[in-house]
Image (cartoon, grey):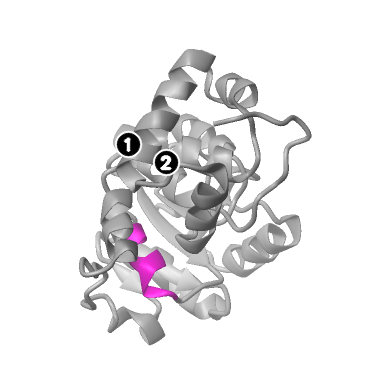
Amino acid sequence: MKRITVLLVEDHTIVRQGLRMLIEVEGDIEIIGQAKTGREGVQMANELLPDVIVMDIAMPMLNGLQATRQILKALPGTKVLILSAHADPAYIEQVVKVGARGYLVKQSSGELLTKAIREIQKGKTFFNPSISKRLSADYQKSSDGIGLRKKALTKLTSRESELLQLVAEGHVNKQIASELGISIKTVEKHRQHLMEKLNIHDIAGLTRFAIEEGITESSVQSTTSEEV
């Protein structure tokens, strides 16, 4: 019987090693690669073509949600299982929207993890039992500014979402241009569109929003000052 091939994408080495140990005891599942960043995960997914990707959300430079979006655009047949330390419905909503097939909190058992891998490989969805019943909740609260911003977040392009994370982590335009392989002028254009869509016009506001929405865990202060 063909084994299910799995790519692990997790930036914490000890967590990644633990996941591998939990999965490798199963005879029908094979770990074929391990990535330390979302960007590395995108590259390895395209090279290795795994059946299932076990993806962390909170990673620097390119988070798991954006990595998932990019992977599924190129490899729509690949199944992605998101792992997170959070059970917040807002995270679950974003996971569904980027096309991931499952969501588990990191406190889950190894047995639940391997069950989730098998289920999503079959084309099913699998969500942590403690949070699956919350999927039908109304996430959009259009009566206040926060709700409108959450709605605007779904309208960001993949590139704008990447830029939002990099800005929130303290990277300046020159660094962002180098990381994304685009010109500084293009970075400035994307940043302007980003601020208009979110109706947030300063870096501090973008940083708070990115942390609140789980796009990044915390900001990294750049040593180079730069005005918006």
Q: Amino acid at mark 2?
A: Ser
In the image, what residue occupies the spot 57% across and 38% down?
166
- The residue labelled by disc 2 is 161
The answer to which of 66 and 51 lies nearer the viewer is 66
Q: Nearer the viewer, residue 216 or 101?
A: 216
**Magenta segment boundaries in residue numbering:** 88-95
Q: Quadrant of the N terminus?
A: bottom left
Tell me if residue 78 comes above or below residue 108 in the rendering.
Answer: above
Outermost residue toward the right? 223
Q: Quadrant of the C terminus?
A: top right
- Depth order, front residue of 111/171: 171
Query: Badges 1 and 2: C-beta atoms under 8 Å apart?
Result: yes
Q: Left or right of 13: which side holds 103?
A: left
Q: Position of residue 119 (x, y in %)?
A: 33, 68
Q: Quadrant of residue 217?
A: bottom right
Where is residue 101 shown, x and y percent of the image?
32, 60
Give the residue type at disc 1: Thr
Q: Is residue 141 visible?
A: yes
Q: Residues within 10 Å of mark 1 (few under 14, many from 20)?
A: few
Front residue of 104/45: it is: 104
Residue at image mark 1: 157
Please give the name of the residue rendered at 51% of the width and 79% of the height, measured from the top-left corner: 111
